Each structure stands twice: as structure tokens, then as C-alpha cells.
Image: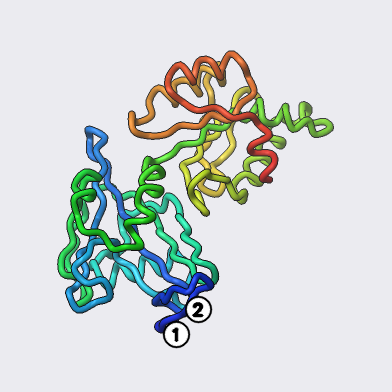
Amino acid sequence: MVKDGDGWILCSQGHTHWGRYGAAGLLAVHWDQDGVPRVLMQERAPWSHHGGTWGLPGGARDSHEDPVETALREAREEAALSGEGLRVRGVYRDDHGGWLFDTVIVEAGTLLPAVPGNEESAQLCWLTPPEIAGLKLHPGFAVTWPRIQTALNPELVVLDVANIVGARAEHGWWRDRKGAAAKLLAEAAGASLRHLVLAEWFPDVVAVVEGAARGLPPVGGIEVVDADGSGDDAIVEIVRQAKPWERVLVVTADRGLRERVTDLGAGVTGPKWLLGRL
């Protein structure tokens, strides 16, 4: 049923919230060539709840929607955004005890034109974090913004496939390295990756394969890179080419590779981090 989420609800903390099934908002962020982020902010219409404050396009979640669907719909209604050119990066969840507000973080390839789509928006502007700090913020957004701000950077996970397959140590994997790699990537594509801040995390994932495992197609959004020579050298080059503001996490237990990528500023975690989520 359309709009069956409209209505007020009392959470277990004794606060009144709009949205019978919770609510969601869209945080669109664009990174310019200098690595400066700009966030699409909405000034709420004076007549609305907390009118005159700044926050995100958002609203009540309907019973048939997930948080991403709600956030994109609200952005269409309030900011006239079509959803094109947006890449979902993660969902930050604010749990009030029986009522949830989900902030859906999306990366915008450009500063998309945004104008008030209905009477709920007074104006919309792309603003830098220092500019946001100077605004009168919606109380809910003011509480969550410091935490969300730490998760804005786009993130890239690089899989050292040969090392992870070896750590998995399934019987006979060495006889069919390509099959073992394909199995790992198929399971990784459906895995729920954990993040320190976000309830749901959708990083870019690149899997580097070498030797007999080469020639695999992309799997479930995972990009597969065939190493022409050393897989370690290919991974180092991927890390080297990452954007300066992009967070990179390399999954490997190889000590030499770990030292090479950390010297370039990447984070490192062992194969157990991934294997424990398959």
C-alpha cells in the first residue's frame, strides 16, 4: 500500500517520530578533483516539523520498502533527483528503540542539479562539511552527522585471491585453482561485509587472480583483475592508483604484500575477515 508509513509513533525512549515503519533519508556526497566532499543538504520548509533547520531529503518508510528504496523515493519527491548517477555506498542506522532512521549514503559522480520537488523543501544546496557546521541543523541530523561524516569516503576492498584460497585450505583446491577462485568469489559476492560505522556497507570490491586462476568473469559486482605476472605487484598497482581520498583495504596474509600496501596508506586485514562472513 502506497504511503501506509505516514503517521506518528512513540519509540521506547519516549520520543515521538514520523513514520510508522521507520524513516530514511538520502545523503548524497560528491568528491571534487581536490578530494573535497560536498553533501546535498535540504533546508526544511518553515511550516514543517523542525522547519527552518537543515538536514537531508527523507521521510517515512512504507511497509513494502527497504531503506534504500525509501531514501531514493524521498529524494525524488523532495529534491527532484531521479537516482541516476548515484552509487549506494552504505546505510547508517540510528536506532531509537522500536523506531529506526536509516541514512543512505550515495556517491554522486557530479554535482547533480537539485531543486525543491515539493513544498517540504525551502532550498537545496551542495555544501562542504565546514559549511554544514555553520548551519542550524535538524536535531536528529545534528546528533548523527559527526558519526556519519567518518564514513563518507568511498571505500575499495582488494582481495588477494590466491592467498585467501590458500588460507581456506579446502581439500584439493590446488588441483583446480580457477574453480576454487570462482567458488570463493561467488560466495564473496553474497557476503555481508562488516563496517565499524555502517549497518550496511557496499564498497567497491576488486579481486586479483593470477596464474591458472586467470580468466574469471566479474561476479556479483566484484571486478576481477588478471595479474599479468605477480599478483602482489598487481595489487600494489591498484592501491597506488586509488584516489587520495579513497579508503583502501587489502585482504591478505602475505607479510611482504602487507608491508608494501601499508607503505602506500592502505589498510590490511587477514583472510579470516572475509572467510568468516561467507
Cα distance between the residues tagged 2 and 1:
7 Å
Quadrant assignment, res 62: bottom left
Q: Nearer the viewer, residue 16 or 120?
A: 16
User: Three-letter amino acid code at disc 1?
Assistant: Asp
Question: At x 55% / y 27%, what residue is drawn?
Answer: 268
Circle 1 is placed at which residue position? 4
Question: At x 40% / y 22%, what residue is drawn?
Answer: 240
Q: Percent from the top left, x then y, of residue 44? A: 22, 69
Q: Nearer the viewer, residue 23 or 177?
A: 23
The number of numbered discs placed on residues in the rendered structure image is 2
- Classed neighbour count for the residue bearing mark 2: other residues with Cα under 10 Å, few (<14), some (14–19), many (≥20): some
Q: Percent from the top left, x then y, of residue 264? A: 43, 19
Task: Say left or right for 16 vs 138.
Answer: right
Task: Say left or right for 184 vs 238.
Answer: right
User: Three-letter amino acid code at disc 2?
Assistant: Ser
Quadrant assignment, res 73: bottom left
- Classed neighbour count for the residue bearing mark 1: other residues with Cα under 10 Å, few (<14), some (14–19), many (≥20): some
Question: Contact, CB < 8 Å: mark 2 with mark 1?
Answer: yes
Residue 269 lies, with reference to residue 234, above or below; the image says below
Q: Secondary structure at mark 2?
A: loop
Single out the residue that lies furthest toward the front: 14
Question: At x 22% / y 32%, what residue is drawn?
Answer: 34
Task: Say left or right for 57 vs 158.
Answer: left
Question: In the drawing, what numbered circle is on residue 63?
Answer: 2
Residue 228 lies, with reference to residue 159, above or below; the image says above
Residue 113 appears anywhere in the view: yes
